[in-house]
Image (tube, helix red, strand yellow):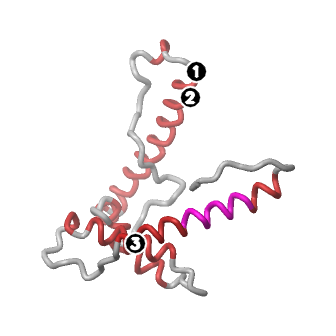
Amino acid sequence: MLQGRPPKLVHYDGEIILRNPENFDDLDAQEKSRIRECIGKSMLFYIHQLRIKNMCPILLEVFGYPYGETRTDPISIMGNTWDNDIIRLRGGLIMLERYWESMGFDIPCPIHLKEEEIHDCIEEEGEIWNSIQNFWGQGCQSGGQGEHYIS
């Protein structure tokens, strides 16, 4: 049950805004656009939450369970590790260790990664993102170097 998540279509982490602010007319076009986008996402998220609350209240509790993704990601990611591709799994374990005490466990975290391992994981993840960017950049652009996510 902890693996329950809102669909990506309606998932929204930003500030919930359901109405224009009083000074909306005084704002520049870019800020108005940002607020309209927030309102649209907020309304979609809010309506979805109301429907879930009426149809399956316990599911709404699961969506709001503290550290739900942090608790379950290593388990769901584990099945997708092949050919030594364990970057996402290591990232999930790093997050689990980082938030262990905040999750309310009264026993020590059974996972402990050295700072060097954490640094290596972050560096390797950055290299992967850069290679993906280079791959797509070469197919979509004629010449020129793109900016790297991690330099």
Residue at 44% x, 41% y is 42
Residue at 44% x, 24% y is 20
- What amino acid is at disc 2? Ser
Residue lying furthest top: 26
Residue 126 counted in the magenta span: yes
Mark 1 lies on residue: 29
Q: CA distance from mark 2 to mark 3?
A: 43 Å
**How far from the left and from the top, in percent, is residue 54?**
34, 56
Q: Which mark is residue 85?
A: none
Q: How many marks?
A: 3
Look at the magenta stretch and give its main secondary structure.
helix
Nearer the N terminus, badge 3 or badge 1?
1
**What is the magenta range?**
125-134
**How far from the left and from the top, in percent, is residue 51?**
40, 53
Secondary element at image label 2: helix
Q: Nearer the viewer, residue 49 or 75?
A: 75
User: Dot 1: within a 10 Å radius of its alpha carbon, few (fewer than 14), some, or many (20 or more) residues?
Assistant: few
- What amino acid is at disc 1? Ala
Q: Nearer the viewer, residue 61 or 118?
A: 118
Q: Is residue 70 left or right of residue 147?
A: left
Mark 3 lies on residue: 116
Q: Quadrant of the C terminus?
A: bottom right
